[in-house]
Amino acid sequence: MVIHADKTFDSHFPVTGEVLSSYPISADSDVQEAVAAARKVAPQWQGLGFDGRRKILLAWSKLLINRIDECAELISRETGKPTSDAKLEATLAIGHLAWAARNAREVMRKQYRKPGLLMANMSATVERSPVGVVGVIGPWNYPIFTPMGSISYALAAGNTVVFKPSEYTPGVGVWLSKTFAEVAPSHDIFRVVTGLGDTGRALCESGVNKLAFTGSTRTAKVVAATCAKTMTPVVLECGGKDPVIIAADANIAKAAEFTLWSAMSNAGQTCIGAERVYVHEKVADKFIETIVEMGKKIKPGAPGVGNYGPATMPKQLDVIDAHIHDAIARGGQALLGGVDSVKRPYVEPVIIVNVPEDSLAMQEETFGPTIIINRVVDMAQAISLSNASRYGLGASVWSGTQGPKIASQLECGMVAINSTISFAAVASVPFGGVKDSGYGRIHGPEGLLEFTYPRTVVRARFQLPVSFTSFGRNAFADRLIVGLVKFLHGRSIG
Ligand code: NDP
């Protein structure tokens, strides 16, 4: 990344390296100013209520869909991905925005809870309040879909937002905030600060009320440590090493077609993309033959030319290359592509079979158009190997009858059965991982609640003749409370 003397940096077209535009490197003071401005307008945004916010957010989603060509073109220029992929990404993001806008009221509705016999004179309620200002730090691989999973839900819940896009896709972030400003009463409700990693650090230290991060596990740990200094809560969506399990009764043609797309579309730069496949030995030959034949028909290239584009972040090519070399050096057999497949800025499709489980390509996120396929003797082995990873983001299961049974045994946040990454497109379900893939959830009711805090309100509807919470408590009250608890909880077990 070139940093200029005037404290700006450039965005590039990854296919040619051509400079697209320059953006300010926001200093700590710029970030603090943006957060202060967002905090100042928070009461105004909250004051609009659910109906007011819904109207504005739906107007924004309408504007985004009307200008989807412009949006897709910008995404394609900054990431190098085909514009049709960029459009798909944008439509999914718009779907989430509309869902969050329409459902915030219901999800955040005040809840009445049973007070229990001892507190029968109380009315117990739980209210939900927005946390205040939410900081969002986004990645470059899906520069609209991924951050909007936090931005839409945070805004719908009544928060204001300061967003720091990846240094590879600053233009998409700036465009998002500009389009929002066209429909919103104040552009401070959703601000964007451009910059490098240090700007992200400044956002973590800025006193935002919650920080939503998407990116690598390594940076997520730095973000969490930085936020811990100010007790800023975080939601972390990190990397994955998503397994695909293929049972003997799977639809092999569909499993091969969807797994190939999951692994290779977007040049493999998908946190929930297929990285490793465990296929039942009875159908392994058929599956491998089918997916290799399909893989031969796809190729990388510039937008409009290839099925997928270049690596958006050039340094990722070294990681992909190292994983391919290690897998083959450790005994893996390349059935499509191999050690010569990294042809900067592209990576040709790579399919390798029989790779040791402790190799780099099975342990670390590759984030390239590669698939590793290993055979298993049964589904128990597939489940055990799938779970033997430090990651736990998503998974796919292909089976005619065993899908739900296998899914419920996987240590991960999301499972697609007889489909791929479908969970990301369903707005009503939560998205996120376990283990090194992060914690907290975006999307769905859980994603809305993530950007709120619960406030318990317990009200005495009438006063009891005996006081328990008073220095006037007497021996009768003592006997009563012990007797009641004995009656309620001290009898038989069950
Ligand atoms: P990072 O995790 O380094 O970056 C993600 C975001 O965090 C970017 O906006 C980045 O800013 C910002 N950031 C960097 N340093 C800090 C910091 N100290 N404090 C706060 N924010 C910071 O990911 P990379 O883009 O470098 O990609 C590295 C790897 O991460 C990839 O190879 C891939 O394996 C994985 N990845 C996973 C993604 C997923 O969806 N799970 C998405 C993207 C990457 P800046 O861009 O300016 O450095």
Image: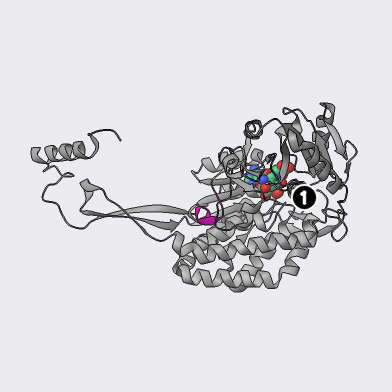
In the shown orientation, is residue 6 left or right of residue 220? Answer: right
Could you say where residue 5 lies in the image, as x and y percent from the top left? 77, 52
Q: Determine whether 88 is above or below 224 in the image.
A: below
Q: Report ligand 1 position as a quadrant.
A: top right
Q: Secondary structure at mark 1?
A: helix
Could you say where residue 295 lies in the image, as x and y percent from the top left? 84, 47
Could you say where residue 263 lies in the image, as x and y percent from the top left? 75, 46
- Its colouring scheme is one colour
Q: Quadrant of residue 484?
A: top left
Could you say where residue 37 lies in the image, as x and y percent from the top left? 54, 62
Rendered residue at 73%/58% (across/down):
23
Q: Is residue 471 visible?
A: yes
> In this view of the protein, which residue sits in the foreground, 388 or 471?
388
> In this view of the protein, which residue sits in the foreground, 222 or 247?
247
Q: Is residue 347 visible?
A: no
In the shown orientation, is residue 140 left or right of residue 494? Answer: right
- Residue range corresponding to the magenta coloring: 441-447
Which residue was labeled with disc 1?
A: 257
Q: Amino acid at mark 1?
A: Glu
Rendered residue at 50%/60% (across/down):
159
